[in-house]
Image (cartoon, helix red, strand yellow):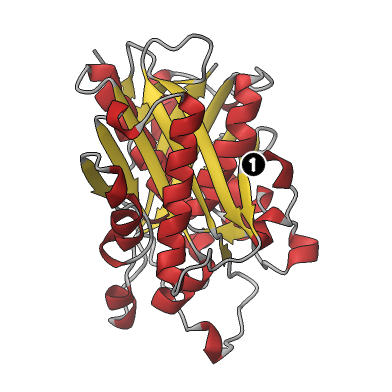
C-alpha cells in the first residue's frame, strides 16, 4: 500500500510499472530532433478529420491503441483510464476515447496533465484498486490556438516569450508484476502557485514558480538532492520558464542546471523551427516522456528520472476578466 512521507510525497509499495507506452505526433514534431523515437508521425495534421478538435481526438485514440498494443493487452484488460487535454470540458479525450469503453476519469491539469494522470493511475494500481490503468493526454496546435488565442486565419504575431503548442499525444499502460520495466516510485502532487503573471503569451513565467515549489517539496520530503537523479525533466517551461526555474531554486541554494532539461526545449529545434521559446501543450511533455525518455529507461540508459509536468490553470473566461495565471506542477519519480 502506498504511504506518504513528509508533507506532500507518496511512495509506492508495489512499484506500478509502465507496461506499454506510445507517442503519436504531427508533422512539425516529426521534423524535430526526436523524430526517430515516435511511434507515428502524421504529415497531415488534420488526420483526415473535418475539424482540428476531431483531429486531436483521433491523435489521442491512436496513442491509446498503440500503447495497448505494445503492452500486449486489449481495452478489456484496463480497469480505468485517466485522460485530459487543453480544450473545454476535455472534449478531445471524451470523444477520442469513448470507443474504448473503459471507465473514464477526465482530468484537467493544463500542460501538467500527463504527470497528473500518470500519478493517479499509478496509485490506483499500487493500491490494488485496479490491475491495469491507462494515462493519456494530447494537444493540437490549431485547436489550442482557436480556443486560447486567435484562429489561425487571424494571422496574429507571436511574442518572443510565446511557446508552440505541440500537435502530439502520449499514452502509458500501468500494471504491477511486469519484470524489468520502468516503474513509478513516488508521486508529489503540486499546490497552486500564483505570483501575479497575466501574460498568456508567457506561460513559462507563470508555471516556473510552481515547478520550483513542487520540486522543493519532493526533495525535502525524500531528503534527496538534484545530483541523485539522472534527469530532472520539466514539461514544459520552454526557454524562459527553464531559466526562471533554475534562478528561483538557485536563490534557495539548490542547483539543478547540470541535471535539468525541459520537454519544451527537447521537442523542437528552436533555431530552425520558429517555435520561439519552445514547445508547450499537454502533448508536448507526453510525447517526450512516452518516446525518448521511457525508451532510454527501458534500455537502462536512464535509471532515475524526475518528471515534473507544469500547467497554467487559466481559461478563456479568467483571461478575459483580467485574472492572474495560476500555475501547477505535479512530480512523478520514475526508476528502472
Where is 316 relative to 232, above or below?
below
Q: Is residue 16 left or right of residue 300?
A: left
Does residue 92 appear anywhere in the picture? yes
User: In which quadrant is the N terminus drawn?
Assistant: top left
Estimate how packed mark 1 is, as few (under 14), some (14 to 19) or many (20 or more) residues with alpha carbons within 10 Å: many
Q: Quadrant of residue 325?
A: bottom left
* Name of the residue lying farthest toward the right: 272
User: In which quadrant is the C terminus drawn?
Assistant: top right
Report the front residue among 121 and 307: 121
- At which x and y percent is residue 269? 75, 57
Report the front residue among 316 and 69: 69
Q: Dot 1 lies on which element?
A: strand
Q: Residue at x 30, y 49 (%)?
A: 99
Report the front residue among 100 and 93: 100
Does residue 212 appear anywhere in the picture? no
Q: Residue at x 29, y 38 (%)?
A: 81
Where is 307 relative to 160, above or below?
above
Q: Quadrant of residue 30?
A: bottom right
List the residue tagged with mark 1: 261
Q: Residue at x 64, y 22 (%)?
A: 302
Please give the count of numbered marks on the rendered protein.
1
- At which x and y percent is residue 282? 46, 53
Q: Residue at x 61, y 66 (%)?
A: 44
- At which x and y percent is residue 148? 41, 75
- At which x and y percent is residue 220? 41, 26
Where is 225 relative to 234, above or below?
above
Amino acid at each position: 500500500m502506498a504511504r506518504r512521507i513528509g508533507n506532500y510525497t507518496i511512495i509506492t509499495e508495489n512499484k506500478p510499472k509502465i507496461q506499454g507506452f506510445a507517442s503519436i505526433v504531427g508533422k512539425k514534431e516529426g521534423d524535430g530532433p526526436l523524430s526517430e523515437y515516435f511511434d507515428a508521425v502524421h504529415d497531415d495534421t488534420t488526420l483526415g478529420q473535418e475539424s482540428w478538435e476531431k483531429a486531436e481526438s483521433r491523435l489521442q485514440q491512436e496513442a491509446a491503441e498503440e500503447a495497448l498494443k505494445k503492452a500486449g493487452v486489449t481495452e478489456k484488460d484496463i480497469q480505468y483510464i485517466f485522460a485530459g487535454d487543453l480544450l473545454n470540458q476535455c472534449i478531445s479525450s471524451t470523444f477520442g476515447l469513448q470507443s474504448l469503453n473503459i471507465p473514464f476519469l477526465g482530468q484537467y491539469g493544463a500542460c501538467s496533465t500527463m504527470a497528473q494522470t500518470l500519478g493517479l493511475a499509478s496509485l490506483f494500481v499500487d493500491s490494488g484498486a485496479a490491475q491495469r490503468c491507462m494515462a493519456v493526454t494530447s494537444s493540437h496546435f490549431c485547436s489550442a490556438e482557436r480556443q486560447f488565442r486567435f484562429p489561425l486565419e487571424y494571422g496574429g504575431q507571436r511574442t518572443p516569450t510565446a511557446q508552440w503548442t505541440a500537435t502530439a499525444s502520449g499514452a502509458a499502460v500501468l500494471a504491477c508484476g511486469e519484470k524489468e520495466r520502468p516503474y513509478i516510485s513516488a508521486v508529489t502532487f503540486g499546490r497552486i502557485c500564483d505570483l501575479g503573471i497575466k501574460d498568456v503569451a508567457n506561460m513559462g513565467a507563470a508555471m516556473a514558480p510552481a515547478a520550483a515549489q513542487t520540486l522543493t517539496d519532493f526533495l525535502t520530503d525524500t531528503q534527496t538532492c538534484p545530483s541523485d537523479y539522472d534527469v530532472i525533466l520539466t514539461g514544459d517551461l520552454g526557454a524562459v520558464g527553464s531559466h526562471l526555474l533554475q534562478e528561483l531554486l538557485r536563490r534557495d541554494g539548490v542547483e539543478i542546471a547540470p541535471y535539468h532539461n525541459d520537454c519544451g526545449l527537447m521537442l523542437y529545434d528552436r533555431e530552425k523551427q520558429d517555435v520561439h521559446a519552445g514547445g508547450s501543450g499537454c502533448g508536448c511533455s507526453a510525447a517526450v516522456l512516452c518516446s525518448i525518455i521511457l525508451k532510454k529507461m527501458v534500455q537502462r540508459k536512464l535509471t532515475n528520472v524526475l518528471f515534473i509536468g507544469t500547467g497554467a490553470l487559466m481559461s478563456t473566461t479568467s483571461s478575459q476578466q483580467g485574472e492572474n495565471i495560476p500555475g501547477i506542477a505535479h512530480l512523478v519519480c520514475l526508476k528502472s
